[in-house]
Image (spheres, rainbow, N blue to C red):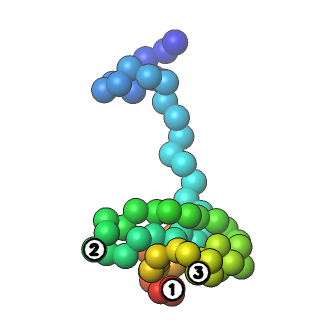
């Protein structure tokens, strides 16, 4: 394999960066802002967040702008 397609640090094949979805559900600031769910369909995200068993979560867009807290 050509060196152009090998990462220098790990020595593994290059992979394109993962596409970010339009909407992301994240833990609030104090809990590390980890993405726990993401989708391009807003209705699907809101249905997922509406489950009463889920803890307090934040809905953010791709650029990180806060859209809702549930």
Local crowd size for mark 3, using a 10 Å CA cut-off: few (<14), some (14–19), many (≥20): few
Question: Image check: 58 left or right of 8?
Answer: right
Q: Which residue is mark 3?
A: 52
Q: Which residue is mark 2?
A: 30
Foreground: disc 1 or disc 3:
3
Residue at disc 2, secondary structure: helix
User: Residue 44's image quarter?
Assistant: bottom right
Question: Image check: 18 left or right of 42?
Answer: left
Local crowd size for mark 1, using a 10 Å CA cut-off: few (<14), some (14–19), many (≥20): some
Which mark, residue 70?
1
Callout 1 touching callout 3 (CB < 8 Å): no
User: Residue 12's image quarter?
Assistant: top left
Residue furthest to the left in view is 30
Which of disc 3 and disc 1 is earlier in sequence?
3
Q: Position of residue 16 (x, y in %)?
A: 53, 40
Q: Position of residue 36 (x, y in %)?
A: 50, 62
Please report the residue visible at 31 percent of the width from the left and 75 percent of the height from the top: 29
Residue at disc 3, secondary structure: loop
Which of disc 2 and disc 3 is earlier in sequence?
2
Q: CA distance from mark 2 to mark 1?
A: 15 Å
């Amino acid at each position: 394999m050509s060196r152009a397609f090998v990462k220098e640090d790990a020595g593994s094949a290059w992979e394109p960066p993962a596409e970010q979805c339009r909407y992301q559900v994240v833990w609030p600031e104090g809990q590390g802002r980890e993405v726990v769910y993401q989708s391009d369909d807003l209705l699907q995200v809101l249905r997922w967040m509406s489950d009463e068993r889920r803890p307090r979560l934040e809905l953010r867009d791709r650029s990180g702008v806060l859209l809702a807290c549930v």
